[in-house]
Image (spheres, helix red, strand yellow):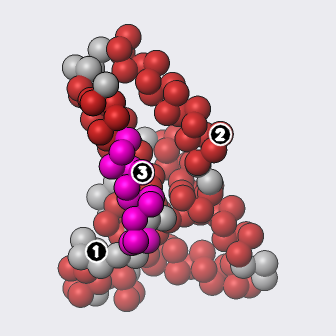
Amino acid sequence: VVKIVEPLVKVLRLVDGEKLAMGYIYEAMDQAKEQIRAAYKDRVTKYGPIWEIIDNRWNNQLHRPIHAAGYFLNPRYHYRAQLGEDQTREVKDGLYECLERMVPDERQQLEVHRQISFFSRATGTFGKNLAKIARDVDQP
């Protein structure tokens, strides 16, 4: 039981803590699931039902486009992420859904999109040495 509960308690502490958690929730949930899988030595018959419960809660109650946007815009994860095609699509869909809600003007949306492109490619200001060093230091 501790093998299951401990990783999930870490996520709850993150969410309930004083620091901003938006850009970290996505990764924290993935890490918690991986720790549970490792605790059950990759035996899907053991961890599979637990993952199903976690995924149902995540998808029905916790997962929101703003979490995906926060994950995408968190440089700590953005430049290191090895997401699969489905996860990449899910994260980008969440980002652009937030963009459309928060920035109603299409010209401004295009400008934000252009800045996102600079961010993704680490060009312009995002490519400067200080910006690269700060990726793992500063909170987004």
Characterize the local packing of mark 1: few (<14), some (14-19) or many (20 or more) Cα atoms within 10 angstroms.
some
What amino acid type should be assigned to the residue bearing mark 1? Arg
Look at the picture and state if 51 lies above or below 100. Answer: above
Which mark, by number, is residue 48?
Answer: none
Residue 73 shown left or right of residue 92 in the figure: left
Tell me if residue 18 is in the magenta stretch.
yes
**Residue at which label 1 appears:** 135
**Residue at which label 2 appears:** 60
Compute the Cα span from label 1 to label 2: 31 Å
| Residue nearest the observer in this picture, 122 or 28 | 28
**Residue at which label 3 appears:** 12
| SS assignment for the magenta stretch, majority | helix
What amino acid type should be assigned to the residue bearing mark 3? Leu
Look at the picture and state if 115 lies above or below 44. Answer: below
Q: Position of residue 55 (x, y in %)?
A: 53, 33
Question: Looking at the image, can residue 120 be seen?
Answer: no
- Residue at image point 35% right, 14% down: 46
What range of the chain is rendered magenta?
A: 8-20
